[in-house]
């Protein structure tokens, strides 16, 4: 055999390397309900120990390979605090991968215990000189930064965190230290089936309290993420995640600036998070008008009044210097809708776009932007409410009239009732804009519905386009 220089024979396996190993410690989150919310038990380290003088959770290392982590935290609870914990009452709350400023790393398992026997007290005075209950949202200083990272993950509902400190970092947590915040990365867990992702649920619970149930309430199309939340103490809200930054900004702006003018006729914004692109809003009673029995004059009059109130929620603005969005995108929509159009439709659409381009621009008001019947709710007592403001923007008032087109199909009396509720008829220029923009909106609906897998929107667009072509010039509004 031929041996390799200074090494084993060719073909021999390489020498085994010692596996990297980390110590494991266990932390007890002993929790109770205080007068102002949840409280946790903390002890202050003392004597010749690491982080002496800092607050910390009762904790320790495993005694050896004979002890599992649950047995370990039960033992530490008894040794340090004197409380007795049953194995069935121990729940894994979060896990932290920590590296100290000295470069040593470890894995910490944080266990929540809400039921126990005995009254906690200092049982190891040589290494602990104080113990007490502290509000979970008002933890004391100074606290071991590693322990605080675990409690931050626990409070946020995250199953884990990475807390890697750098040489020279302080051992105690220091509130407001941006460097310390950067050392902690909270790790989200997998999303529950049919429920919101954990990060979204944690955000919602910071706004409304503990959630007992989350039911998927999304519309049956792509990009719709909505959940109906039921609070543990009662109450109902809706959690919504937007598909992009722009719809999130538009809806938050509408809720903060314009929706209050509607009073109880719309949800209220409870919480918003720009990074998550999510909002929580209150629930309003009622069922969508989409699919309900045919509307009557009273309902259309109420829709008109609601639309007018939203348009008057902020002062009007002068006409925009640039053309309306429909004028700039209709060709793209037409290309996407072509497979679904009847002969002659394309030429009809192009003629409408030419007419719109030649019209003087209209003044701008706050508009809903998607005022379809499925975004209007009617309660059992007949009260009307409007939801879904992610397309709201300053635009000509006729933008909302266009989207309500189907509500008065072939019923001039219903259209007249809407005008009565709105409080004024459209001007001649607005009627011309309405007739042209209704054509482009119908094509936009066909293109959007096709791309989003929303057949109802496709059929509504085709139906509207057919009616518009059959209507005499100038009679488009009816």
Image: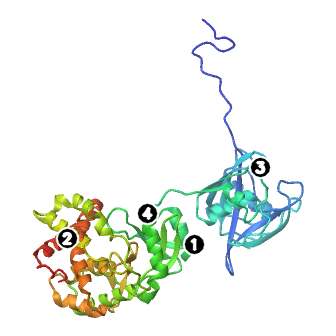
Q: Cβ–Cβ below 8 Å for labels 3 and 2? A: no
Front label number (4 vs 1)? 4
Q: Where, quadrant-wise, is the N terminus in this rendering?
A: top right
User: Gap between marks 1 and 3, in whole Å?
Assistant: 32 Å
Identify whether 13 is placed above or below 375.
above
User: Gap between marks 4 and 2, in whole Å?
Assistant: 31 Å
Residue at image point 38% right, 71% down: 217
- For marks 4 and 1, the one nearer the N-term is 1
User: Gap between marks 4 and 1, in whole Å?
Assistant: 22 Å
- For marks 4 and 3, the one nearer the N-term is 3
Q: Which of the 4 image quadrants contains residue 265?
A: bottom left
Q: Residue furthest top?
A: 1
Identify whether 86 is placed above or below 438.
above
User: Gap between marks 3 and 2, in whole Å?
Assistant: 69 Å
Q: In the structure shown, which secondary structural element does the residue marked by tag 2 occupy?
A: helix
Q: In the structure shown, which secondary structural element does the residue marked by tag 3 occupy?
A: loop
- Residue 206, which numbered label? 1
User: Gap between marks 2 and 1, in whole Å?
Assistant: 50 Å
- Residue 352, which numbered label? 2
Identify whether 456 is placed above or below 337.
below
Q: Which residue is mark 3?
A: 101
Of 382 and 463, the residue lying toward us: 463
- Residue 244, which numbered label? 4
Q: Which of the 4 image quadrants contains residue 371?
A: bottom left
Residue 30 visible somewhere in the drawing: yes
Front label number (4 vs 2)? 2
| Horizontal side of residue 287 vs 3, given as left or right | left
């Amino acid at each position: 055999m031929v041996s390799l220089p200074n090494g084993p024979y060719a073909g021999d396996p390489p020498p085994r390397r010692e596996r990297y190993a980390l110590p494991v410690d266990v932390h007890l989150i002993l929790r109770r309900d205080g007068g102002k919310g949840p409280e946790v038990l903390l002890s202050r380290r003392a004597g010749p120990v690491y982080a002496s003088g800092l607050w910390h959770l009762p904790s320790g290392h495993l005694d050896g390979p004979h002890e599992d982590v649950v047995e370990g935290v039960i033992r530490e609870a008894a040794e340090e605090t004197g409380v007795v914990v049953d194995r069935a009452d121990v729940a894994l709350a979060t896990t932290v991968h920590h590296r100290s400023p000295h470069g040593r790393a470890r894995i910490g398992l944080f266990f929540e215990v809400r039921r126990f026997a005995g009254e906690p007290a200092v049982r190891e005075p040589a290494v602990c000189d104080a113990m007490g209950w502290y509000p979970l949202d008002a933890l004391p200083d100074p606290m071991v930064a590693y322990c605080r990272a675990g409690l931050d993950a626990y409070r946020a509902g995250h199953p884990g965190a990475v807390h890697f400190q750098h040489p020279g970092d302080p051992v105690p947590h220091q509130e407001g230290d941006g460097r310390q915040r950067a050392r902690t990365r909270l790790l989200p867990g997998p999303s529950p089936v049919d429920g919101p992702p954990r990060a979204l649920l944690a955000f919602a619970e910071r706004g409304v309290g503990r959630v007992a149930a989350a039911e998927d309430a999304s519309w049956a199309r792509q990009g719709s993420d909505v959940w109906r939340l039921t609070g543990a103490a009662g109450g109902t809200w809706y959690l919504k995640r937007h598909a992009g930054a722009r719809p999130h900004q538009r809806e938050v702006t509408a809720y903060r600036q314009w929706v209050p003018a509607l009073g109880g006729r719309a949800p209220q914004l409870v919480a918003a998070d720009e990074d998550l692109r999510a909002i929580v809003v209150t629930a309003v009673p009622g069922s969508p008008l989409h699919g309900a029995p045919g509307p009557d004059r009273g309902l259309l009059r109420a829709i008109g009044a609601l639309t007018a109130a939203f348009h008057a929620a902020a002062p009007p603005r002068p006409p925009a210097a640039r053309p309306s969005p429909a004028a700039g995108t209709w060709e793209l929509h037409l290309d996407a809708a072509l497979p679904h159009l009847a002969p002659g439709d394309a030429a009809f659409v192009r003629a409408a776009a030419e007419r719109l381009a030649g019209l003087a621009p209209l003044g701008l008001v706050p508009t809903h932007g998607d005022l379809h019947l499925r975004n209007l709710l009617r309660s059992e007592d007949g009260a009307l409410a409007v939801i879904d403001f992610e397309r709201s923007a300053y635009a000509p008032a006729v933008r909302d009239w266009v989207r309500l087109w189907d509500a008065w199909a072939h019923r001039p009396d219903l259209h007249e009732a809407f005008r009565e509720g709105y409080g004024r008829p459209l001007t001649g220029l607005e009627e011309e804009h309405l007739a042209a923009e209704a054509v482009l909106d119908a094509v936009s609906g066909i293109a959007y519905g096709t791309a989003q897998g929303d057949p109802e929107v496709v059929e509504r667009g085709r139906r509207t386009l057919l009616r518009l072509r059959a209507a005499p010039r100038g009679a488009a509004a009816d």
